[in-house]
Image (cartoon, grey):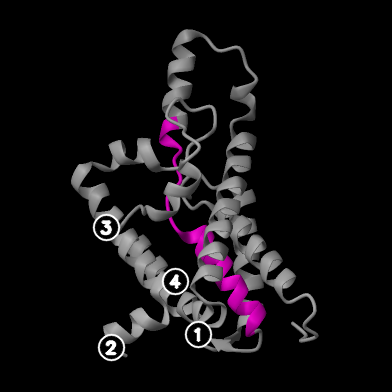
Amino acid sequence: MSFSSIQRSSPIVLNLVIINVIVFVAQNVFGETQVNNLFALHHYKADVFQPYQMVTHMFMHGGIFHILFNMFALWMFGSLMERIWGPKRFLSFYLVCGLFAALAQMISYAVAFWGYDHAALTAVQQIQYQSNLSASATVGASGAIMGVLAAYAYTFPNTELFIMPIPFPIKAKWAIIGIIGIDLFGGFANASNDNVAHFAHVGGALAGLAIVWYWNRNNKKQFF
């Protein structure tokens, strides 16, 4: 498939990939910390929090493998869903899933920092607290892309996928259920060395499932 045919068939996916790559380059050119403070998603009590971060965080990434994996998944599954729905509906779907992912992550922040949020802190402790809040930043398109994956699994539930490192194909409906389950486990386990925004993934996936179910509520096609 040529570049021009990709552009004609899935312009939103193509432009989303381009924007994500441009932002990733900007992160590395202007300094990750500075850009993260401005555009990554922070706790609502952080001094650097701004409401627009609910949107901007989904165009940023934490490393080369992070953006490569996300953009590959967006291209593989998003292109097909855009061709089915059309550009406007796909873009609306993608952004709404990203916003719900951000909301889920904000709830996760509120729970994680609950004790500090309701404690009487000294001036020194408050400075350290704000430093911790600023460091707890979320970036990535993963939440929105999880919504796309969920929509794909709902639309094509019995399509078989190969997911590394599993050596045999798995139907899409079981794959998305398994991925959500793994994210739920990872979120509640809360391992100290785990920097994955598991609840953002779950929020995006559940939003995607809810939206695509609503759009197809009169369709008698069975998921199982």
Query: Which residue is rendered at x = 41% and y = 26% of the image?
Result: 131
Instruction: Give the distance between the C-alpha atoms of the residues marked 3 and 2, in whole angstroms.
Output: 22 Å
Q: Quadrant of residue 203?
A: bottom right
Instruction: Give the distance between the C-alpha atoms of the residues marked 4 and 3, in whole angstroms.
Output: 16 Å
Three-letter residue code for mark 3: Ile
| Closer mark to the observer between disc 4 and disc 1 | 4
Three-letter residue code for mark 1: Phe
Instruction: Give the distance between the C-alpha atoms of the residues marked 4 and 2, in whole angstroms.
Output: 18 Å
Dot placed on the residue nearer the N-terminal end, 3 or 2: 2
Instruction: Give the distance between the C-alpha atoms of the residues marked 3 and 1, in whole angstroms.
Output: 30 Å
Asked if residue 165 can be seen in this view, the reply is: no
Please determine whether, in this image, residue 211 is positioned above or below residue 224. above
Asked if residue 8 can be seen in this view, the reply is: yes
| Range of residues picked out in magenta | 134-156
| 64 sits to left or right of 197 | left
Mark 4 — residue?
74
Report the residue that reaches farthest toward the left: 29
**Label ID, residue 51:** none
Q: Is mark 2 on a helix, strand or loop?
A: loop
Three-letter residue code for mark 2: Ser
Instruction: Give the distance between the C-alpha atoms of the residues marked 1 and 2, in whole angstroms.
Output: 25 Å
**Label ID, residue 22:** 3
Q: Is mark 3 on a helix, strand or loop?
A: helix
**Label ID, residue 162:** 1
| Closer mark to the observer between disc 1 and disc 2 | 2
Dot placed on the residue nearer the N-terminal end, 4 or 1: 4
Dot placed on the residue nearer the N-terminal end, 4 or 3: 3
Q: In which quarter of the image is the N terminus?
A: bottom left
Mark 2 — residue?
2
The image shows residue 23 at horizontal and vertical percentages of 30, 53
